[in-house]
Image: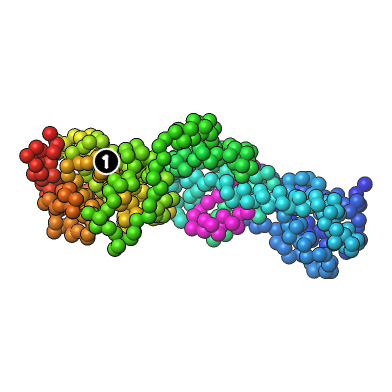
C-alpha cells in the first residue's frame, strides 16, 4: 500500500509533478511507496471559468535543491504529457534512480530511460502534428467588440499537449482571436493572453466555410498523381488525423484516379521545358521573339505546360493557372492583365466583377462572348492577404515578362486577326513598350509582326471610377471596342 498519494492538478501539471517529486526525494520516499493521481477537471462552459493559467513553476515554499542531470528536465517536461496513466510513476522512478544510482547517467540503454525517452519523442511528434493539422474555421461576425472570437478549430490530440502547443499558435496567429477546442482542454487567445478551459465537444466548433472550399480547390490542384506515395503520405499525415482535416476527404478520390492520371500524363506528347524570360527591361522586341519556335503545338498542350509553370513566384501562391478561353480560331482576342480572385478559384478568365462589366459591354455591342478569345497577360493571380481577403496586386514587370512566352504561344496558336489590349499591362506585354492608355486608346497600333492591337481601358479601371463618371466612361469604352469590331478590315471581325 502506498505511503504517499500525490494528486496533481491536471494531466499536464508538469510543475506540480516537479514540486512533488522534489519534496518526495528530500523526504527519501522510494518510488514504490508513492501513488500518483490526477484530479479530474469539472465540466463547465467553455472558458466560463476564471482564467486557468498553466500551473506556475514556482513552489509555494522554497524546498531544498535536488541535483539531477541536465538531460532529465526537458525529457520530463515532454514525457509528462504522454497519455500513459503510469507516466508520473515511471518519471519519479527514473528520477529516484538517477539520484541514487550515479552510473545510470551514462547508461542510455537502461529500460526506464529508454521508455521515458520514447514517451518524450511521441509527445514531441504529436505537438508537431498539432501545429500542422489544426484547421481554423471562421465564426460568423457577432458585431461584438474587438475581443470577439473569430476563428475556432477542433482537434483531437492523443496526448496532453494543448498547454504546451498553444504558445506556438499565439505567436503564429497573434493578430487573430481564436480558440482551439479539444475533448480534454480548450484554449483561447484574445490577442493578449492564453486562457485555458475544460474540454469541449466537436459540435461546439463551427462547420465548414467558404474559405475551406478555397483550400480544397488548391489541394486538388497541387496534388500530383505521379508523386503519390501512399505509405509516405500516411506516415506524414497519419489516418487518425484525417477525420478533422477537410482535405482528407479528397485523398481517396484523388488517389483512386492517380494511376489513370499518371498514365495519361505519360501518354501525352512531351512538352518543351519552360524557358526563363529576361526581365522586361531586357525583353526581346516583338519581332525578335521566338514565337512558335519552341511553343507547344496545340492549345491543350499549352495549357498542360502552363499548369506546371513556376517561372515566377506567382504560380506557387495562386490556386490554379488561368488560361485563355474561346474558339481556337477566334478572329478577335481580348487580353486582360491577370486573373482576379474569382478567376483564380474557377480557373476561367473574366468571371468576376471586371468580367461582368465586360459582359455588359459585349451585350451592348451585340458581340457573343463565345465568338471571342479571352485571355490575360499573366496566368496566375497575384494578391496580398489582408486578414482573410486576397487583395489584387498589379503584377511586376518581371512577372509579366516571365509569362509572356505563354501569351505569345497562345497568340500563335489562335492566330487572331486582331487583339484588344485591356489596360496598360496587356498593352505593354503585347507591344513590348510602355503604353499611355489614355493617350493611345481607341486606335489601331501595329506590332512588329504585323498583328494589329487596339488599346483601351481595363474594365477594373471603370469599376474604380467615381459613380458619376462611370456612365460616360462606359460609353467611351464602348466606342473603343466598337472600333475593334468593325474598323479593321473589309470583313467585320465579329460577323
Ligand atoms: N481582370 C483581368 O485582367 N483578367 C481577368 O481574367 C479578370 C480580371
Q: Which residue is mark 1?
A: 413
Specify whether residue 206 is painted magenta: no
| Residue closest to the eye, 181 or 443 | 443
Q: Quadrant location of the C terminus?
A: top left
Describe residue 290's horizontal placement relative to residue 196 as left or right.
left
Q: Which residues are the magenta region?
A: 165-183
List x then y, in percent, for residue 22: 83, 62
Question: How is the structure coloured here?
Answer: rainbow
Residue 108 lies, with reference to residue 494, above or below; the image says below
The quarter of the displayed image where residue 214 is located: top left
The quarter of the displayed image where residue 19 is located: bottom right
Please say whether residue 172 is visible from this viewpoint: yes
| Residue closest to the eye, 59 or 230 | 230
Secondary structure beneath label 1: helix
List x then y, in percent, for residue 350: 28, 42
Q: Residue at x 89, y 62 (%)?
A: 103
| Residue closest to the eye, 173 or 348 | 348
Disc 1 crowd rating (10 Å Cα; few below 14, some 14-19, many 20+) is some
Q: Residue at x 55, y 39 (%)?
A: 228
List x then y, in percent, for residue 41: 70, 47
List x then y, in percent, for residue 79: 75, 53
Q: Residue at x 59, y 51 (%)?
A: 131
Describe residue 488's horizontal placement relative to residue 317 as left or right.
left
Q: Residue furthest left?
A: 490
| Residue closest to the eye, 449 or 350 | 449
Amino acid at each position: 500500500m502506498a505511503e504517499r498519494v500525490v494528486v496533481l492538478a491536471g494531466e499536464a501539471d508538469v510543475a506540480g509533478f516537479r514540486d512533488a517529486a522534489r519534496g518526495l526525494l528530500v523526504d527519501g520516499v522510494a518510488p514504490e511507496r508513492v501513488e500518483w493521481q490526477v484530479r479530474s477537471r469539472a465540466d463547465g462552459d467553455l472558458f466560463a471559468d476564471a482564467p486557468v493559467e498553466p500551473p506556475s513553476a514556482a513552489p509555494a515554499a522554497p524546498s531544498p535543491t535536488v541535483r539531477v542531470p541536465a538531460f532529465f528536465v526537458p525529457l520530463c517536461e515532454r514525457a509528462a504529457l504522454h497519455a500513459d496513466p503510469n507516466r508520473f510513476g515511471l518519471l519519479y522512478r527514473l528520477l529516484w534512480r538517477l539520484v541514487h544510482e550515479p552510473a545510470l547517467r551514462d547508461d542510455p540503454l537502461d529500460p526506464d530511460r529508454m521508455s521515458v525517452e520514447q514517451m518524450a519523442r511521441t509527445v514531441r511528434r504529436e505537438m508537431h502534428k498539432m501545429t500542422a493539422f489544426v484547421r481554423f474555421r471562421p465564426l460568423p461576425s457577432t458585431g461584438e467588440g474587438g475581443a470577439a472570437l473569430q476563428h475556432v478549430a477542433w482537434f483531437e490530440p492523443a496526448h496532453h499537449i494543448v498547454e504546451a502547443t498553444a504558445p506556438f499558435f499565439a505567436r503564429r496567429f497573434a493578430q487573430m482571436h481564436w480558440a482551439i477546442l479539444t475533448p480534454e482542454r480548450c484554449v483561447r487567445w484574445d490577442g493578449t493572453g492564453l486562457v485555458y478551459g475544460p474540454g469541449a465537444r466537436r459540435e461546439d466548433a463551427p462547420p465548414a466555410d467558404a474559405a475551406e472550399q478555397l483550400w480544397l480547390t488548391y489541394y486538388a490542384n497541387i496534388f500530383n498523381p505521379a508523386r503519390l506515395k501512399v505509405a509516405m503520405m500516411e506516415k506524414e499525415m497519419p489516418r487518425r488525423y484525417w477525420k478533422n482535416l477537410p482535405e482528407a476527404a479528397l485523398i481517396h478520390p484523388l488517389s483512386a484516379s492517380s494511376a489513370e492520371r499518371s498514365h495519361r500524363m505519360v501518354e501525352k506528347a512531351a512538352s518543351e521545358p519552360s524557358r526563363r524570360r529576361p526581365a522586361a527591361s531586357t525583353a526581346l522586341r516583338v519581332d525578335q521573339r521566338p514565337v512558335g519556335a519552341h511553343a507547344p503545338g496545340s492549345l491543350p498542350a499549352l495549357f498542360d505546360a502552363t499548369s506546371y509553370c513556376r517561372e515566377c513566384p506567382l504560380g506557387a501562391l495562386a490556386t490554379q493557372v488561368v488560361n485563355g478561353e474561346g474558339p481556337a480560331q477566334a478572329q478577335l482576342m481580348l487580353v486582360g492583365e491577370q486573373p482576379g480572385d474569382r478567376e483564380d478559384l474557377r480557373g476561367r478568365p473574366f468571371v468576376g466583377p471586371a468580367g461582368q462589366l465586360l459582359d455588359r459591354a459585349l451585350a451592348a455591342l451585340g458581340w457573343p462572348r463565345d465568338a471571342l478569345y479571352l485571355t490575360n497577360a499573366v496566368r496566375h493571380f497575384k494578391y496580398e492577404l489582408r486578414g482573410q481577403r486576397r487583395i489584387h496586386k498589379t503584377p511586376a514587370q518581371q512577372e509579366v515578362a516571365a509569362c509572356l512566352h505563354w501569351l505569345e504561344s497562345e497568340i500563335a496558336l489562335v492566330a487572331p486577326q486582331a487583339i484588344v489590349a485591356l489596360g496598360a499591362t496587356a498593352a505593354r506585354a503585347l507591344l513590348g513598350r510602355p503604353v499611355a492608355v489614355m493617350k493611345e486608346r481607341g486606335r489601331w497600333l501595329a506590332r512588329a509582326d504585323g498583328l494589329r492591337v487596339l488599346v483601351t481601358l481595363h474594365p477594373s479601371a471603370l469599376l474604380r471610377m467615381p459613380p458619376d463618371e462611370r456612365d460616360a466612361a462606359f460609353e467611351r469604352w464602348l466606342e473603343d471596342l466598337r472600333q475593334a469590331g468593325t474598323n479593321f478590315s473589309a470583313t467585320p471581325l465579329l460577323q
